[in-house]
Amino acid sequence: MIAVVVTVALAFVGYAVTYLNGLRLAQRQEFLARVNRQLGDFYGPLFALTEANSRIFRAFMERNARSDGRSPFVHETPPTEEELAEWRLWVTTVFLPNIRAMRDLVTQHADLLNEPEMPPLLLQLCAHVSGYEITAARWAQGSYDQHLSVVPFPSEEIAVYARQGFTGLKREQARLLGRRLAR
């Protein structure tokens, strides 16, 4: 009789251990799948877009800065018509498509955010894009009295946010895969 009880108890313990281990592995796989989605659908593209936008903006500034190295928009002397036309060209062909893509990531993939609530800087990004869309619509109608969005672009903040989110998730992904990342 003791042998039967011990056998049943061991079988039950074995089943419980197998069940709990399977549950733990399934949860780990689900977590890894979420991390992969966060990287592939939100933080990776956001990081790439913010880096590309920063680099192309620096290239624009190197090419179009005034002789003292400052932007025509932060200078005592207002921008010339040629400078404004060049700005409109860059905004409509490069900057606006980039920031629209960033905004679309935020609005279409908010479920992939690390935070439980929408970070204010992402809301500012969305508002900045809307502000530029109305400015660009005015340009399309031939009205050139405005050249900037009514909401400032959170350039440095969004770059830091995207970089930290991406690198943090890459570390988590490596940990879940049992790998080490070089620092």
Image (tube, rainbow, N blue to C red):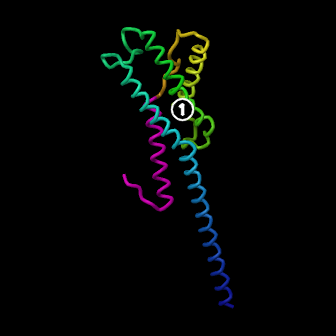
Q: Is residue 125 above or below residue 146?
A: below
130 or 138, which lies in front?
138
Picture coordinates of residue 16, whole percent (x, y): 63, 72
Q: Is residue 6 above or below residue 78?
A: below
Q: Residues within 10 Å of mark 1 (few under 14, many from 20)?
A: some
Picture coordinates of residue 111, whole percent (x, y): 62, 42
Range drawn in magenta? 155-183
Query: What element does badge 1 sit on?
Result: helix
Picture coordinates of residue 82, whole percent (x, y): 44, 12
What amino acid does circle 1 point to? Leu
4 or 130, which lies in front?
130
Q: Which residue was labeled with disc 1?
A: 122
Is 179 covered by the magenta stretch? yes
Picture coordinates of residue 174, whole percent (x, y): 47, 56
Instruction: Tell me: 124 left or right of 156.
Output: right
State which quarter of the image contains the N terminus: bottom right
Is 69 covered by the magenta stretch? no
| Rendered residue at 58%/64% (across/down) | 25
| Count of numbered marks | 1
| Rendered residue at 52%/21% (across/down) | 151
| Rendered residue at 50%/36% (across/down) | 49
Kindly indicate the quadrant of the structure image that contains residue 58.
top left
| Rendered residue at 63%/81% (across/down) | 10
- Prevailing SS of the magenta stretch: helix
67 or 160, which lies in front?
67
24 or 70, which lies in front?
70
Instruction: Tell me: 7 left or right of 153.
Output: right
Q: Residue furthest left?
A: 68
